[in-house]
Image (tube, grey):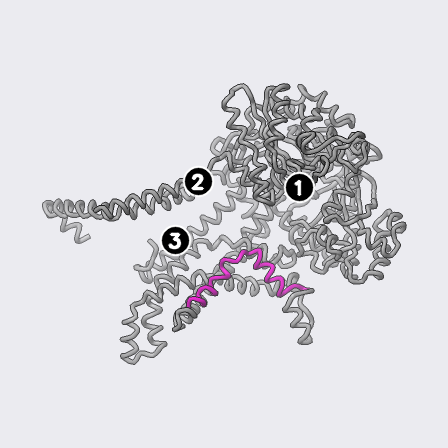
Amino acid sequence: MKKKVMSMLLVLTMAAGLFAGCGSDPANTPDAGNGESGGSTQSADAGTPAPAPAESTDDGDVYTVDMYLLTPAEVPQGLDRVLEEVNKITMAELNMKLNVVFLSFATGAQQIPLMLSSGEKFDIRFGGSGDAPNYVNSGYLTDLSDLLPAVQDTLNASYGTGEVEYASVNGYIYGVPMHKDQVFQPTVFFATDILEKHDLMDEALAITSIEELDQFFEKVSALEPDMWMTAPEIGVNGGRMKTILYDGLGDMWGVLMDLENGTTIENLFETEEFYEYCRYMHKWYQNGWVSQSAATDTESYYTYIKTGQAFSFFSDFSHPLSESDQEANCGGKDLTMITIGPKYQTTETAFQFTYSIPSSSEDPEKVMQMINFMANSPEINNLLNWGIEGEDYIVTEDGHAAFPEGKDADSVAYHLDGGWTLPNQYLCYPWEGKDIDIYDQMKAYNTENVIQSVGLGCQWDSANVTNELAAVTNVRDKYYKEITTGTVDPDEYIPLFNEKLYAAGLDKIIAEKQRQLDEFLAGK
Amino acid sequence: MQQGAFVKNAPCIKKGVYMKNRKKMIHNVKRFLPLYIMTLPALLYLLINNYMPMPGLVLAFKRFNAQKGIYQSPWAGFSNFSFLIQSREFPIILRNTILYNVSFIILDLIFGVFLAILITEIRKLKARKLAQSLVLFPFVVSIIIVSYMVRSFIDHESGLLNHLLLNLGSGSIQFYSKSQYWPFILIFVHLWKSIGYGCIIYISTILGIDRSLLESAALDGASWFQRLRYITLPFLKPTMITLSLLSVGRICNSDFGLFYQVPQNSGLVMDVTNTIDTFVYRALLTQNNVAMSAAAGFFQSVVGFTFILIFNGITRKISSENSLF
């Protein structure tokens, strides 16, 4: 009998143990994401913010703004101390608290949609504009139209670029653009060591078009026969064609080819520009100047540059910080940047990333105040980017931020260096080694000599043609990568591609986009 | 039926039987209570994970808006299904999904049983355990790793197979752009990867057969094949039917990793590698439409359920003791 009671007890405790294991503290969920993104468990533990939402319940009047930031950099340790300092400021100025959670891009891409669809409370979403129309249609994001007037004057001033467009779909304002580069420019990066080895630097810098690039590749490939002349961008769906200027109002199904004066949406894949691009790629493919496995490769071009397999890659970014950014991406390899086209601005480039307020936010008005406040507060931006002054960084005599004596990125308690994801990086001290007026250069870069698309501010909404969109997306997956990497003969496959696209309903999509553009232009 | 009539005519007996049954039941419950408690977590898991979300199926018929919630969102009829069912690709992806699954079910069964019989014939215990583990091992390898293993064989530039072909004097083959090879590659990879799982279950069934049966049959002069034909296979039959029925229920679903990762998402072979799951993934990756994906899942479940009903019906007709319900 005793034995039976004992075994019964044992079973019960074991069952209870199981449940204890199942239960999880909801406040800890974001931490799990942090751990993944941090790359090291240590940083995850330390980088986990004290669950501020719990604190806020103590004091009913204080609203805590939960901000989820995606960061290209490693999730920094010691965020708690920094947030403590931040909260001293926000409490004094706004009677609000700020809670920041950093996620890596990969983790965020999965977690943020889940948080949105589950209605979990959070207040600031940082994200790309591609998903926005669907998020707006699904009711995930708050319309900022009524919230903006209260803060618009100070918020606009923080960009330092004059008139500011806010990201919207059908008049539903969903996003505040980031304080970062908002224009694209067809750009090529070369591996500097190869240029120097063959003394080709001057020749490289003189290149202004894809024709000249082609001739240049001819020359370099003779000198470096085993090298790929370029490594194409390989996303899940194939890369953007970065040398072609077009405005797709959000995607590539039907585009404006004449940015400044065009009003007609046409099929990008029938344009001469597309044919020309693909013919070059096909030629390069046949010559062995690009990877023969490009169409099925999933490795990023950064890897091939880093390992010395590839000589160059195309990019959209020519802004003042671009070269150092890309060098960091390529593991510190020295790169040389040239541009082969004009700067242009479309909805996509201007609203590449925005802050939005999810509809699960409990007090959007206060969140808007917080966004405005942060966009104008040098203290908060410096705190989030460089940590606490005197401990994590010092300010040099000429106004740069730098590591304290004898410290580096690993030994200071906090160092993010993820400026463009922050509320307003322009207010940070420039880091040592960067030009002191780097952020003024950035503002100028956004406004000087830019071709502005007539469709700037118009982001099309695919809600009426979801079936067609699903169909053309499947057609794209079948042909696009093979055609744009040059794997197949463009003159044979592009007509086939277009035939399948039209069969899948491309003209209906183009007509719908045209209608929305016409409406937008009429209302302008 | 007869028993029921008998009981009806004898109420006193019925009561007695009932009392006896009740006592027995209470006794049994008491006796097995610890076991019931042990199943509780699993049952709760089933309830929370499989039954509580079921009302969410209604999402497939809604135009979802998060601010209104699932149940308050406006109805959308069957419009969420049209992207899948009215698509021009639909006949192709349905064909691919079903044909691959049918061949998987048949080949899994044949090769699984075959391998299980071979393994149980190994006399040395250690060697048998090793063989079991080796067969199961591919099952636990991540499909991403498998996709690169496949690539290392058939890659155009660095693949082992292409090197071999070149050395033999014939030209290399661009596997990733030739669709005729992919049905075989996919079926081979699937078998290599998943065969161990069914195999282990068959092995345990075979090992559960009373040895004395086989020994006495051998003494009576039954050959190895006769023992296999008249003893081992009949014992395996229920397991074979159960495993096959379970896979029939997923006939409209496909192993996403196998069909998306292993062909490296190559467009030129999509006619033979696109299945319902990869189609839905491609279609909705950029759209993020939960209602449309719910509709696709709903469709797959309904088809799977119908197939289970049909095949279970057939099984019941042929050998009723082996049907699921």
Depth order, front residue of A156/A138: A156
Left or right for A6, reference B77:
left
Q: Residue at x 77, y 43 (%)?
A: A324
How dense is the environment of label 2, judged by Cα within 10 Å: few (below 14), some, or many (20 and up)?
few
Left or right for A369, reference B301:
right
Q: Amino acid at mark 2?
A: Pro
Depth order, front residue of B261/B203: B203
Q: Are dots 2 and 3 on a single chain?
A: yes
Residue on which the image places disc 3: B309
SS class, disc 2? loop
Query: Which is closer to the viewer, label 1 or label 2?
Result: 1
- Residue A219 sits in quarter: bottom right
The magenta span reads B128-156
Depth order, front residue of A79/A225: A79
SS class, disc 1? loop
- Overall secondary structure of the magenta stretch? helix
- Residue A175 sits in quarter: top right
| Tag shown at residue B53 | 2
SS class, disc 3? helix
Q: Is residue A19 above or below residue B241?
A: above
Residue on which the image places disc 1: A410
Q: Is residue A263 above or below residue A220?
A: above
Q: Are dots 1 and 3 on a single chain?
A: no
